[in-house]
Amino acid sequence: MTLADLFLLALRNLQQAKLRATLTATGVAVGVMAIVCMVSFGLGLQENLLARTLAKFDIFTTVPVTGASVSLMLELQQNGSAAAAPEEAPAGAPAAESPRNAFRRAEPRRPLDDKAIAEIEAIAGVDYVLPRVTFTAFVQFDGKTRQLGLAGAPLNPAHLPGTSKLLAGQPFSNDYARELIVTEDFARLFAHAASRRPPSSPFAPPGPELNEAERTKAASQLLDREVVLLMLRAGSAAGRGTPAEAVAGPGGPAPAEAGLERQVFKIVGVVPTLPAGAMFDRMIAGSSDLMVPMGQARLFRQVNSDPLSRLGAALLGDTGYPAAVVHVTDPAQTQRVYEEINKLGLRAISLTNQLEEVKRVFLIINASLALLGGIALFVAALGISNTLIMSITERTREIGIMKAIGGGDGQIMGIFFLEAMLIGLIGGLLGSAVGWAVDGLANHVVNRYVGGGGKPLVEFFFIPWYLWVGAVGFAAAISLVAAAYPAFRAARVDPIRALRHD
C-alpha cells in the first residue's frame, strides 16, 4: 500500500469511531490551548517591555559613556604614566589578584575630554556623540526668577536629548548664539507655586490634555520671548563672597542686583516635554527644561563651576565631561562600539548586556509556563495511547487479514502513527484557534476595563506565528510518541490468532 492508501485507511478508522476520536482530539485541544494561553501571556509581557517600552528609548542604539573621576585621575597621575595603561600581570606573577585591583581594572583610565570625544566619533558605526554639559543658573522670565537646570544641546534637532522634533521654532543658528530651546511646559515653571509642575520630577502630573494643533499654537507663543540668565560678574566683590550691600554705593544698582551680570537669551525653539514615565530618557539623556547651544553651555559651565571643580581643573587641567551618550547607526554594531570604547580607556555601559539578561529571564518564565501547559498535553497523550490500544482490541481480526494478504509490520505501524498524527493535528489546530480567541477576548476586556481612556491597545497576550505553529507541531509530535507503544503492539499481532479472533 502506498502512503496515500495508508492515510485514507487511517482516516476511515477515525470516522468509524467518531465519538472516541472527537473526545481524544478535544483533550489534545485543551492541552494546546493551555500552552498557547500561558506562553502568550509571557510573550505579551516580553513584547510590551522590550519591543514597545524599551524600543521607544533607543536602548538598542545608545551607549552611555563616562570618564575617569578627578580622584582617580590624581591617583593615576601620581602613580606615573604606566598606571594609565591597562594593567597586565607581570611574567611569573600569580594569577589571583585582590578584589580592589580587579575593581580598578574596570575603572576608566582617562578623562572624557574633547580628544576622547573625537576618538569615539571616529569609531566605525558611531552616528554621533552627545556630551552631557549641564549647569544650574538663576533664570528670569515673565517678571519672575527661578533656579533651574540648563543643558547644552547640539545644532541638529534630531540629536536633541530626549526628543527628535520641535513643536515650534527652529534649531540653534550656531554654537555660541544667545538662543534657547525650551520645553512646552517652560512657562508653567514660572507660574504660581501651587499650580506649576515640580521641576525635574519624573512623576510630574501631566498638564491639560491638548491636541497636536493646540500644543503647537501654545508653543508658538513662547517664540522670540526673552529669558535672562543671571551670572556673577567676573572679579566682583559679591563673587568673592563680600555682601552685596557693601558693593552697592550711592546711586549704584540695587543691592540685590550688585555684582550680577544679565545674559539675555531669546527662545527660538520649543520641544515636547518628556512624559512622566520616561525614566530611561531622563536617566540617559538628562532632563532639563532649558537648552542652550553647546558652546554657550561650555562657557557657562566654566564660569559657574563650584570651587572643588575649579581646584580639580587647576591640578589636572581639563577634567572633561561628566558623561556622554553615544548613538550607534545600527543596533547590530552596538556591542562592538561598546567594546571599542572600553579599549580607549573609558567606561561604556552595555545596555545590550542587560537586555540579554532580561531576555534570559523571560526565556525561563516562558519555559515554565509552557511546562505547566504541557502537563495537560501529557494527559491528552495518555488518552491517545488509550484510544489506540482500544482500537487494536476492536480491530484485531482486521489486522490479521491485512497481514495475511501481505501487509508488513511497517504498514501496520504506519496506520496507527497516521491516526495518532491526525488526532494531534486536529486537536492542535482546534486548540490554537480557541487559544487565539481566548487571548483576543482577554486583550479586549483588559484594554477596555483596565487600560481605557482611549489609550493605544496593549497586547497583554501576544501570539506570534511561531507560537501557534510550534504548538500544532508539538501536539503532532507528542501524538506520534504516544502512538509508539500501540503501533508496536499492533505490529506484533499474530495473524493466525488474529484471524481466529471474534
Image (tube, rainbow, N blue to C red):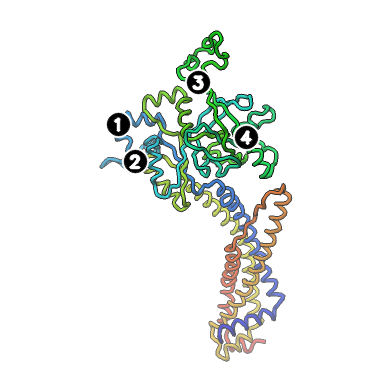
What residue sits right under mark 2 in the picture?
Answer: 96
Quickly name the residue at label 4: 222
Q: For numbered disc 4, what is the local secondary structure?
A: loop
Element at label 1:
loop
Secondary structure beneath disc 2?
loop
Q: Which mark is residue 232?
A: 3
Amino acid type for the residue under numbered disc 2 = Ala
* Residue at 37% from the left image edge and 31% from the top image edge: 73
Q: Earlier in the sequence, mark 2 or mark 4?
A: 2
Q: Is residue 74 left or right of residue 436?
A: left
Foreground disc of the pair 2, 1? 1
The furthest residue to the top: 250
Question: Which tag, 2 or 1, sits closer to the chain's start?
Answer: 1
Report how far apart the C-alphas of labels 4 and 3 lie in the structure.
Answer: 27 Å
| In this view, the mark in front (2 or 4) | 4
For mark 1, what is the residue?
A: 80
Circle 3 SS class = strand
